[in-house]
Every structure is written in C-alpha cells, then in structure tokens.
Image: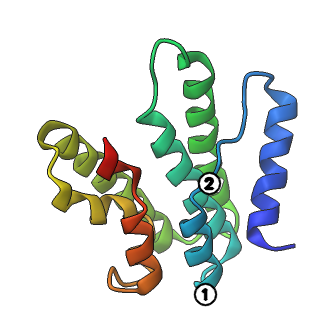
Amino acid sequence: MDFYTQYKEDNLKLESRFPLYRCPAVNADLVGILTRLSIADNIKKSILAIDSAMRLGGNVDDDNKAHTLLAADLLSAQFYHYNAEDFDQTVFSNLTECVKRYNLLMSAFHTSQDESLIPEIEAAFVLPFISMDDPAVQQMIRHSELYTK
C-alpha cells in the first residue's frame, strides 16, 4: 500500500474515533512531489500531516474553531507519530526546524503581506529533500492560496 493510501486510511480511523474530526483535503501538488521523492513512507505521511495541520491553523475562526482546532491538533500528533515510526533523528530534526521556519515565515507574511515569502512557505516541508527550482515545487508555489489572501 502506498503512503497516500495509508495516510487516508489512518485519517478514516481518526474520523471514526473523533466525531468532530474530518480529514482536510491535502495539497495535491504536495502529494505529487512526495510520490517522486526517495524518502521513507512514514516521512512522506508526516509531511502531509504537518502541511495539512499548518494550513488548517491559518483558517481558524469563531464558526469553525471546534473542529478546525481538533483537526489541526490531531494532524500535528500524526506528524510526531509518523516520525516515530522507523525513527531517524536527522530527518526528525530537519522537519522540526522546518516547522519552526514555517511559523516564522507565516508570522512575517501575516504582518507584511510580502509575497516574496510565499515560495519558502509553500515549500517549507519538502526543501530538505528537493530543490526550490524543481518544476513540481514551482507549480505548487504558483497554486498557493496565499497569493489570494
């Protein structure tokens, strides 16, 4: 079973355990990039989980806070769970640095609306494994919802 099918099955299990949880749509461009990368499936799943959690975190409002915060928390927990499978300290350290960098960049973006930050925000979790210049990464950046905020 491929990493994306496993990820979806894991999320169906979460949906059955937590009535308010609904797995958010993943970034299709990111799935395509991860499919091409020669990294462990648990790392691919952890990247999907943290990318989804971070995107959700930026969309919390009074109307959706209960289920959105639950989903973001569960996806963040999945990130750590997936990293614990076949644990690789170096990869884990790199990805946690990516999370910190993402948060700093998003904070700067929300303050400044500086569009030059968007490429690194969008590619934050794959940059340890692929070049920003890769055509698939460039496509993911072009599709960013941040350009319309």
Q: Is residue 27 left or right of residue 107?
A: right
Residue 55 in view (yes/no):
yes
x, y percentage for residue 29? 55, 68
Q: Is residue 7 left or right of residue 144?
A: right
The residue wearing badge 1 is: 38
* Residue sticking out furthest to the top: 62
What amino acid is at disc 1?
A: Ser
Query: In the figure, residue 71 lies in which quadrant?
Result: top right
Tag 1 near tag 2, CB within 8 Å: no
The residue wearing badge 2 is: 26
Q: Secondary structure at mark 1?
A: loop
Q: Who's the residue at 70% across and 73% down the image?
A: 41
Q: Who's the residue at 58% across and 84% down the image?
A: 37
Q: Who's the residue at 33% across and 85% down the image?
A: 133
Q: Is residue 76 above or below residue 63?
A: below
Give the mark, 1 or 2, whose residue is nearer the N terminus: 2
Query: In the figure, residue 101 lies in which quadrant?
Result: bottom left
